[in-house]
Image: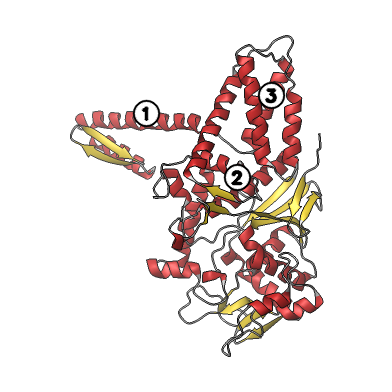
Amino acid sequence: MDNKLVVYNSLSRKKEEFKPINPPFVGLYVCGPTVYGDAHLGHARPAITFDLLFRYLKHQDYKVRYVRNITDVGHLENDADEGEDKIGKKARLEQLEPMEVVQHYTDRYHREMDKLNVQKPSIEPRASGHIIEQIELTKKIIENGFAYESNGSVYFDVEKYNKKYKYGILSGRVLEDLLSNTRELDGQSEKRNSLDFALWKKASPEHIMRWPSPWSDGFPGWHAECSAMGHKYLGDEFDIHGGGMDLLFPHHECEIAQNTASIGENSVKYWIHNNMITINGQKMGKSLGNFITIEDLFNGSNEVLEKAYSPMTIRFFILQAHYRSTLDFSNEALQAAEKGLARLLKGVETLNKLNVSDKGNYNATALKDKCYTDMNDDLNSPIVVAHLFDALKTINSIESGKENIDKSNLEILKETFNTFLFDILGIKNEESEGGNDEMLKDVVDMVLNLRLQAKSNKDYATSDFIRDELTKLGITVKDKKDGFDWEI
Ligand code: ZN
């Protein structure tokens, strides 16, 4: 069995053995969502990909500090340096405080991640809570000569940086090509060069989210937060930085430039990126009319969807593709995943009921070794799933008496399913959870029947007490002529 985890590093563009800087500690930073709307499919994939990595590293006894940020300031429309703040715009349209928008969508994101069985990161810092750190980062870059102030804003000087270090090492883009592909600067621009990016932006009078700084009342540029927070929580140098492929350029490229310009090194040993999701072969986008939120998938409320899909179907579907492959969402593919997962879970049920023989011919260690070998090969979850499907055939033929298994191999087989399907792939059995729903329903019905009794005894104090307490728990009670109705 090959025990060594190998990961594909976007920086070296090859697979490398994973060797933490300071074992057993591992620092993992992943770019989280910008919370100005409901999480969509594009959010589900990085969350699940890095959850798989987080779980697997912990399974290998590493002590992982997983930082996944919340972007709540500075992310302007079109990922550009001009335009309205995404959260500020939503707040203006809905007549809310920006932080109300942030809280609302952060809560929803958390709820969806819980349903997808995505484990919570160790730290979930918000950009707006780290303005001082971002100002310090900007000061340092100015001090080192790689940024300049212009009309109250501060820009990173890409050309100057490129002369000393090389801009584009992550994306493989060459500065000269980038320059010839970008529009000429108009005379109005504050930038020396069109590729320069904002570290700090002076706020226009109508801009709500603003903080004082040495340069102006304003707000940090989008890329600054991840450099500042990665540095704060994981140090000058840390092991893994992850995110979706769409963030590789310019977001992560700019992060490398900021880190190098401020402390002289790129800071990150392994850059890991998950590939994108397409829908029926097309890119997902609001303008394309195929924009699916995670909530839509759970309740089937989107015309692209033929039905609702359970969170575990979504999770299993995502893990049935390698994280570096593109993944196409279609109703057929989701329904195939749904059936496949049901088959695996049925197999686990059968497995737990198998009888042992004194002598068996099945070697479960071989299965276990294969699962580790492929998980170690850059988290090859689809092949691990294929091994589990292979084992189903054996489980069924042992059940029907065609094959035998001895006690120790049965234990290894059970352990392999538990470890890989549940602990590492993070699948949970939703049917047994459904049992909890049933129980909740019975308990609420019972309490409301007691309330009816209290009412018929004219004990209105108890009746009101029960209704009020249920309301506090988020259960709305509606009285009806012939009884009651309730909903959560
Ligand atoms: Zn980021």
- Amino acid beneath label 3: Leu
Q: Which residue is mark 2?
A: 119
The quarter holding residue 272 reads: bottom right
What kind of element bears circle 1? helix
- 66 or 132: nearer the viewer: 66
Rendering coords of residue 295 (x, y %): 45, 49
Mark 2 or 1, nearer chain start: 2
Mark 1 or 3, nearer chain start: 3
Q: Residue at x 43, y 66 (%)?
A: 90
Q: Where is 328 relative to 74, above or below?
A: above
- 446 or 418: nearer the viewer: 418
Rendering coords of residue 100 (x, y %): 45, 62
Q: In whole angstroms, how far apart are the C-alphas of marks 2 and 1?
A: 30 Å
- Amino acid beneath label 1: Asp
Mark 1 surroundings within 10 Å by alpha-carbon count, few (fewer than 14), some (14 through 19), many (20 or more): few
Q: Which residue is mark 1?
A: 442
Mark 3 or 2, nearer chain start: 2
Q: Residue furthest bottom?
A: 187
Q: Which residue is mark 3?
A: 413
Q: Residue at x 65, y 84 (%)?
A: 149
Label 2 CB less than 8 angstroms from ligand 1: no
Mark 3 surroundings within 10 Å by alpha-carbon count, few (fewer than 14), some (14 through 19), many (20 or more): many
What kind of element bears circle 2? loop
